[in-house]
Image (cartoon, grey):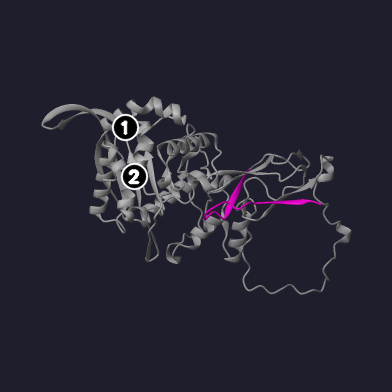
Amino acid sequence: MSVEIKVPTLGESVTTATIAKWLKKAGDTVAADEPIVELETDKVSVEVSAPQAGVLGAEVAKEGDEVEVGALLTTLEPGAGAPKSAAKSAPAEKPAEKKAAPATAPAPAAKQAAPEVDAAAALPAARKLMTENNLSAEQVGTGTGLNGRITKGDVLGFLSQPQATQPAAAPKAARNDDPREERVKMTRLRRTIARRLKDAQNTAAILTTFNEVDLSGAMAMRAEYQESFVKKHGVKLGFMSIFSRAVIAALKEFPAINAEIDGDDVIYRDFVNLGIAVGGPNGLVVPVIKNADTMGYAEIEKTIAGFGKAAREGTLKIDDLAGGTFSITNGGIYGSLLSTPILNAPQSGILGMHSIQERPVAVNGQVVIRPMMYIALSYDHRIVDGKEAVSFLVRIKQNVEDPRRLLIDV
């Protein structure tokens, strides 16, 4: 009995995916848990594996097609193997068996003929939506899908525009590319990053406040306990866990920065799911340390190291990126001295860390050289007041400069 292989649940708010690549073809023999197709979502790439050993049937959707959660991808015939011809799809109905329509049958009266949408111009879900709304590919314009194909999101974006601002059907003038230029289609992940960041700017009232941190105390603590820490936990004590613990303590004191706006309501939380921005081969992703407020330095360091490895190898899962309540991004590892991070909506705050530089500072009336770092807090001014934001950043500064404060809860 054949087994249906469908698009799996893809995580929070993700309802569609694009077929990036078929790893196996119809008629191929596959083992249990062997990847057969790679799906690209708005957030990460996901491999769908065979639930058991067998022979693959025909591909229901092609590379580049947009598919919804639960849609059929292919079938699997149980068994160790079979000739490829046996796995092909059932033959089409013979012409002789087709029933011809009566010659006198009247043509159905159409209210208004919907424009035909070329299959090469739009993905299946987009074609259906365009047909339902009597739209042509020229009206929607160039798509953001593979090879410029129109996606369901493109159609929804077009329909969401006020009627007066919707573009006319006149074709857009083609850009004359310089022969020294190379045109490369944006990946779905990159398009999603661009859209989400722009949505955050359009929705939230983003404001950024700055401070600087003297890392002498944190460096001294690391130097004193690093060897013992590595020996006991098998991982180094880094600045990310120090800042993470400082942030968690500050969020408990200023809960609005850990909250989010939902319509006319504010959702407050008594837990912290901490997003840590990580650079991967396909762009920036923000995996989430779930219940970070229950973790110590070692567990946080191990989790961050695991996320970094998974991001580099492209093995992050959808669940790894969902549910964050506050984020930290460290541009300092790339040499950034100062920046204004953008909110990771619907979160209300994000902390930016930067390069550590030795600078002259005044301490007790004396000019001394200290390892200093600028830190930045971008926050949603709709929910967080300026006083709260500044006080929150000062508390992080205090917790990092003197980590003993966290032990005695002051």
Q: Is residue 310 above or below residue 360?
A: below
Task: Indicate which disc residue 247 carries.
Answer: 2
Range shown magenta: 1-20
Q: Specify the quadrant that holds the C terminus.
A: top left
Disc 1 residue type (three-letter)? Ser
Quadrant in the rendering for residue 360: top left
Q: Residue at the front extreme?
A: 408
Q: Residue 39 location, x and y as percent?
A: 61, 45
Nearer to me, 211 or 120: 211
Q: Can residue 174 be seen?
A: no
Labelled pair 2, 1 in contact (Cβ < 8 Å): no
What is the secondary structure assignment of the residue under circle 1? loop
In the image, residue 254 lies in the stretch drawn in magenta:
no
Q: Can residue 31 be seen?
A: yes
Q: Which of marks 2 and 1 is nearer the N terminus?
A: 2
Q: Residue 154 location, x and y as percent?
A: 52, 55
Find disc 1 in the rendering and name its residue: 355
Task: Indicate which disc residue 279 carries.
Answer: none
Q: Is residue 144 above or below residue 228?
A: below
Q: Is residue 367 above or below residue 11?
A: above
Disc 2 residue type (three-letter)? Val
Q: Callout 2: 10 Å neighbours few (<14), some, many (20+)?
A: many
In the image, residue 16 lies in the stretch drawn in magenta:
yes
Q: Residue 172 location, x and y as percent?
A: 49, 51
Q: In this view, does 112 lie to the left or right of 275?
A: right
